[in-house]
Each structure stands twice: as structure tokens, then as C-alpha cells.
Amino acid sequence: MRSLLVISALGALGLGGAALRPASAPAVPVDRTAPIAQAVPSAAPTDAAFQDVVMTACLAPAERDLSLGEVPMARRRALAACVIRMLAPKMNEGLPARIDPITTLVAVRGEDTTMTYRYRLDLTAADLNPQIRASLERQVRADFCAAGAIRPVSAFGGAVRFDYVDGVGRQLMAIDISRC
């Protein structure tokens, strides 16, 4: 059996939000009464062996039968940080990945309870006027929230950050999402 935390982190954090997970993809429900060690749906983005490694490294055996509601937020945050530390290097395999004609996912970084997706845009700072920035932020938030991906992330005290840089690595903008 896989843990709800692994489902949450691998299913929500691991798919990178709207850019990598279509809004029509099923969201991972957050059932606060289900055991943490419930089965992982087949939609999880990593193989079962990796999920088992993460669960073994991050969850004490005594925690596997606890419901999410029985796990204090401080412990949930520690679990999220553990999963993020293990997941980020796995997600970097195969990067960079072209998302669309002007967007490339170049790196994924995990720091504490935040998973950061770094995208390179084939644009300059001058191309991103305030209206375009606002539109991009609204679209990223809407897509990510519509996919339901943030529910399990926020249930564990985590957040997702989308960093956008230009072709030489200069920061263009960042979008932080911890709840919808």
C-alpha cells in the first residue's frame, strides 16, 4: 500500500500543475479520515517502486495507519519536506522539457515544503508588460486550482512556486500558490 502523502506529493507536486497536468485530469482527493497508507491511484507520475522508497523513507511504520486528521500539521509539513527532497531530483530526470512554443521546464527544486518549477520563456522582460504578467498569473492559478492539485499540497502545509526566467536566466516573474 502507498501513503496518502506519497499520492499527494507525487500526484500533485510531481505533475507540475497546469503546465504538465491538464485541467481535465482527476484531482487527488484529500480524505482526512482515510489511512495515510492507502493505495496510490494509477495516475501517479512515478513508478510504484519509487513511491515505496519515498514512503519508507518519509513515514514511520506507526504512521501508516493514521488518518490525515490525526497527523499534526507540524508532522505533515515534515513529511511534505521529506517527499519534496526526494521527488525533486527524480523530476529533473529528462529535463529540459518543452511545454509549448515559448516555454521550457528547465528544473525542479525542492526547498523545505515548497516545490519550485523553473521555466524558461522565450521572451524578454520588455515582452512581459503588466497586462501579460497578470494574464499569465491568472491562467496559471486557474489551471492549477482547477486541476485540484493544490488541495493535497496545502493539506500537508506545502506550496508550489512557478519561476519564469528569460533565455539567459534573469528572473521575469514568480507565482506562488499555497491555496486556491
Image (cartoon, rainbow, N blue to C red):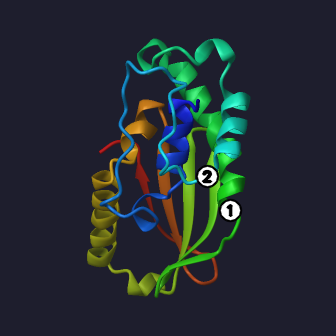
Query: Secondary structure under badge 2?
Result: loop
Q: Which mark is first along the chain, 2 or 1?
A: 2
Vertical placement of residue 36 versus 98, above or below: above
Q: How many marks?
A: 2
For image coordinates 33% across by 80% down, the residue present is 129
Q: Is residue 152 left or right of residue 112?
A: left
Spot occupied by residue 171 in the image (x, y as percentages of width and height): 54, 70
Spot occupied by residue 1 in the image (x, y as percentages of width and height): 58, 29
For image coordinates 27% across by 63% down, the residue present is 138
Disc 1 residue type (three-letter) = Asn
Spot occupied by residue 20 in the image (x, y as percentages of width and height): 46, 65
Q: Are marks 1 and 2 in contact (CB under 8 Å)?
A: no
Q: Which residue is mark 2?
A: 46
Q: Which residue is mark 1?
A: 92
Disc 2 residue type (three-letter) = Thr
Vertical placement of residue 127 versus 117, above or below: below
Vertical placement of residue 11 versus 54, above or below: below
